[in-house]
Amino acid sequence: MSAIRDEYEQSLVSVVRELDEEQRREVKDFAEFLRARQVVRSKRVPTFEWQGALRDLRDKYTSVELQHEISDIRAGLK
């Protein structure tokens, strides 16, 4: 697996070397943006704020019926 990673990194370095200085700065900025976004995503903890939001529909629909209703809404049928 390390060999595949090394090959990929060499390929990326090769492409970056062909860019002019301004494009290299853009690549660096974008890579830093991706790294920062990755850190933010990995630190998010689920809140489950939605838990119990459909409690009032418990007696009206089964879980399967709710899934069908949601599918219909997403498909624009309702």
Image: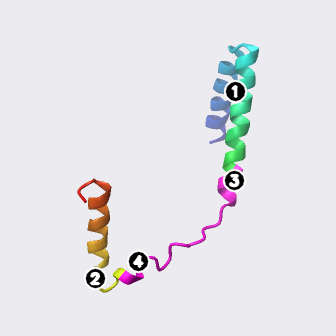
Snapshot quadrant of residue 11: top right
Q: Secondary structure at mark 3?
A: helix
**Mark 1 vs mark 4: which is more N-terminal?**
1
The magenta-colored residue range is 39-56
**Mark 1 vs mark 3: which is more N-terminal?**
1
* Distance Cα–Cα, label 2 vs label 3: 39 Å
Q: Which mark is residue 60?
A: 2
- What residue is drawn where x is 65% and y is 66%? 45
Q: Which residue is mark 3?
A: 40
**Spot occupied by residue 77 in the image (x, y as percentages of width and height):** 23, 56
Q: Which residue is mark 4?
A: 54
Is 45 inside the magenta-drawn segment?
A: yes
* Foreground of the two, 11 or 54: 54
* Distance Cα–Cα, label 1 vs label 3: 20 Å
- What residue is drawn where x is 41% and y is 82%? 55
- Secondary structure that dominates the magenta span: loop
Q: Secondary structure at mark 4?
A: loop
**Mark 2 vs mark 1: which is more N-terminal?**
1
Q: Which residue is mark 1?
A: 27
* Distance Cα–Cα, label 1 vs label 4: 45 Å
**Spot occupied by residue 1 in the image (x, y as percentages of width and height):** 62, 42
- What residue is drawn where x is 28% and y is 67%? 69
Is 5 inside the magenta-drawn segment?
A: no
* Distance Cα–Cα, label 2 vs label 1: 54 Å
Residue type at the position of mark 1: Val
Q: Is residue 48 above or below residue 24?
A: below
